[in-house]
Image (spheres, helix red, strand yellow):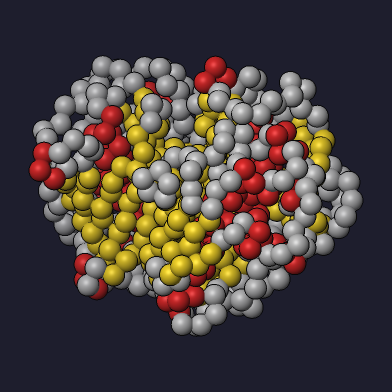
């Protein structure tokens, strides 16, 4: 879940350079310039990065519907149907149900040309990815944010950052320890923190994507496949780190499919607490 | 009073009343056997649950494996039991199901297992997996199910623990899932289900498995309407149960979002026409060419 705190310098969401706009309560759009540092082997934006965008656009769409309450992402599913190559990608999020304790949203992600987000006239006619997510509504009195959120969040703002001078996997210091086991680690520091001092859900998605691709690549004996589907379930906050993954292959890659894997993310510094479950689907690049 | 999606206690804030309806039409159709697995050694914690479905021919897809709608129905029934036992004396209603399938060819029977991943004040998250006993316990699917906790009113929720139900007997001529779930024949992007009484769950609303089967059938029809190249089967599915289906007919409106000749992603929106066309469910089904 995003908030205005990401406008502070030195945050990975900021380095993505997201431009956000609230169209109305329950609707928002987020745009990002595509750079090689955030793309996968098929030339499209990494699924983990798209999941981060979707999380942000969902939060922007939902924030104005919950008054002084707060939101936490409970689950997020992203499915890529074709590589999103840009030059700009645009995510549009809509609240489809608001209950007392949860919000459900959907989002579509399009290739687009540089331009004004709200018009939509310059984007591709069909989405390259589709997503749904559930946010838990947390009563405002229980909020534990470490960052002040402006009362009047502007309708349109840019999350400024320095951009990436290396692949995002390296920028997040993600390292593969055991590809076959999907054991991948990511240190935790303020660069990844969300408003409550825990690892931002998008960073978890990038880590899960890397772990799933590593495990499936090892199982298939060839190059790492391209992750197209991420189904994230957030069970607990990752606070201490490093975050360490473990993966099991549900279906190994074959001639056309990149396979299916299940990834668990543990907070190694918090007694290996299970924080996130991720169902990963992949395709061979070019298939 | 929790007023969460999917139904229970109405999903509209009305308390449930009267004894719980012990009908097991849907579970009996799939011959789902269920058993509770208490924590080992009497330790504190939540029970797991196990289940088994004999994979009969009428439950198989064109690929030879279990149909996605069938599988989700079994997962919904088993995961619902797991989550419900976890929150007694309260009860639950399913709010989302996300299923990832492995290879779509299975021998059967299928064995299911469920465990609680997180139990919060308002929700239970459970992890479910399915293996093919006839193929050396090869993985079939993995699923995450989220349930919302609700007040059951004065419903009788007494269970003999550890809870178990035997496998229902086989029917001599079981109907196809389309017939059992009252899914009307058709083609194209819109598919209709008639809300018959045997499809209602104990809360009087349309069973989640019926919605899953409707979504699967509708998604396959939508893809087949765009291409005549060979049979198709449903695979991965994501379903958010937004509101209860009470009146019907219930329609699934599909949009094929794209993909490859082998794999297509279909957005499925479920509406209850009898409730002013209210959108009651939203999700996606991945459709594979066989």
Question: Can you give x and y, in whole percent of width and height, for residue B278 in the image?
Answer: 57, 33
Left or right of B136 in this view: A81: right
What quarter of the picture does the C terminus of chain A occupy?
bottom right
Whether residue A118 is visible to the viewer of this picture, yes or no, is yes
What quarter of the picture does the N terminus of chain A occupy?
top right
Image label count: 0
Q: Depth check: A262 or A84 in front?
A: A262
Rendered image quadrant of residue B116: top left
Whether residue B290 is visible to the viewer of this picture, yes or no, is no
What residue is at 71 percent from the left and 64 percent from the top?
A: A166
Left or right of B86 in this view: B149: right
Question: Can you give x and y, in whole percent of width and height, for residue B28 in the image?
Answer: 22, 48
Q: Depth check: A123 or B188 in front?
A: A123
Left or right of B197 in this view: A156: right
Which residue appears farthest toward the right when viewing the image?
A: A115
Location of residue B109 with respect to A93 vertically, above or below = below
Question: Can you give x and y, in whole percent of width and height, for residue B18 in the image?
Answer: 25, 18
Q: Depth check: B122 or A16 in front?
A: A16
What residue is at 81 percent from the left and 31 percent from the top?
A: A155
Question: Can you give x and y, in whole percent of width and height, for residue B149 in the image?
Answer: 37, 28
Rendered image quadrant of residue B112: bottom left
What residue is at 80 percent from the left and 29 percent from the top?
A: A154
What residue is at 45 percent from the left and 71 percent from the top?
A: A179
Left or right of A79 in this view: B83: left
């Amino acid at each position: 879940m995003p908030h205005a705190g990401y406008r502070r310098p030195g945050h990975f969401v900021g380095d993505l350079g997201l431009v956000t706009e609230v169209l109305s309560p329950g609707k928002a759009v987020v745009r990002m310039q595509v750079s090689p540092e955030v793309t996968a082997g098929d030339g499209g934006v990494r699924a983990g990065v798209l999941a981060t965008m979707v999380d942000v656009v969902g939060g922007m769409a939902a924030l104005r519907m919950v008054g002084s309450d707060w939101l936490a992402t409970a689950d997020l599913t992203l499915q890529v149907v074709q590589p999103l190559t840009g030059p700009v990608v645009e995510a549009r999020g809509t609240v489809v149900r608001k209950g007392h304790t949860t919000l459900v949203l959907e989002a579509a992600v399009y290739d687009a040309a540089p331009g004004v987000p709200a018009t939509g006239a310059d984007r591709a006619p069909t989405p390259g990815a589709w997503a749904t997510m559930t946010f838990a509504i947390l009563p405002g009195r229980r909020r534990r944010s470490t960052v002040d959120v402006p009362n009047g969040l502007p309708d349109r703002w840019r999350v400024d950052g320095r951009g990436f001078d290396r692949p995002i996997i390296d920028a997040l210091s993600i390292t593969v320890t055991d590809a076959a086991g999907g054991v991948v680690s990511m240190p935790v520091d303020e660069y990844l923190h969300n408003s409550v001092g825990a690892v931002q859900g998008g960073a978890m998605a990038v880590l899960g994507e890397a772990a799933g691709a590593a495990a499936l690549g090892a199982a298939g004996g060839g190059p790492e496949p391209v992750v197209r589907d991420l189904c994230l379930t957030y069970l607990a906050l990752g606070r201490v780190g490093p975050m360490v993954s473990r993966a099991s292959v549900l279906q190994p890659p074959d001639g056309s499919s990149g396979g299916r894997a299940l990834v668990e993310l543990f907070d190694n510094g918090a007694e290996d607490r299970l924080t996130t479950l991720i169902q990963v689907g992949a395709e061979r690049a070019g298939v | 009073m929790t007023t969460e999606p999917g139904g229970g206690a109405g999903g509209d804030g009305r308390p449930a009343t009267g004894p719980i309806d012990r009908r097991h039409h849907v579970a009996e159709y799939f011959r789902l056997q269920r058993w509770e697995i208490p924590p080992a050694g009497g330790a504190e914690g939540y029970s797991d649950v196990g289940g088994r479905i004999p994979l009969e021919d009428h439950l198989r897809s064109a690929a030879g494996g279990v149909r996605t709608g069938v599988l989700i129905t079994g997962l919904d029934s088993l995961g619902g039991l797991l989550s419900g036992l976890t929150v007694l004396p309260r009860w639950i209603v399913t709010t989302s199901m996300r299923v990832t399938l492995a290879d779509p060819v299975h021998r059967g029977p299928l064995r299911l297992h469920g465990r609680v991943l997180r139990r919060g004040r308002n929700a239970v998250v459970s992890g479910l997996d399915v293996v093919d006993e006839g193929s050396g316990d090869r993985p079939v699917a993995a699923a995450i199910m989220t349930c919302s906790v609700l007040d059951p009113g004065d419903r009788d929720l007494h269970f003999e623990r550890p809870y178990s139900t035997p496998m229902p007997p086989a029917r001599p001529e079981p109907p196809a899932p389309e017939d059992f779930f009252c899914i009307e024949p058709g083609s194209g992007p819109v598919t209709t289900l008639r809300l018959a009484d045997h499809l209602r769950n104990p809360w009087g609303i349309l069973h989640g498995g019926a919605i899953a089967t409707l979504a699967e059938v509708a998604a396959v029809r939508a893809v087949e309407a765009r291409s005549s190249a060979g049979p198709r089967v449903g695979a991965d599915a994501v379903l958010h149960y937004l509101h209860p289906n009470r009146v019907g007919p219930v329609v699934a409106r599909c949009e094929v979002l794209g993909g490859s000749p082998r794999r297509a992603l279909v957005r499925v929106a479920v509406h209850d026409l009898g409730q002013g066309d209210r959108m009651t469910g939203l999700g996606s089904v991945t459709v594979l060419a066989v």
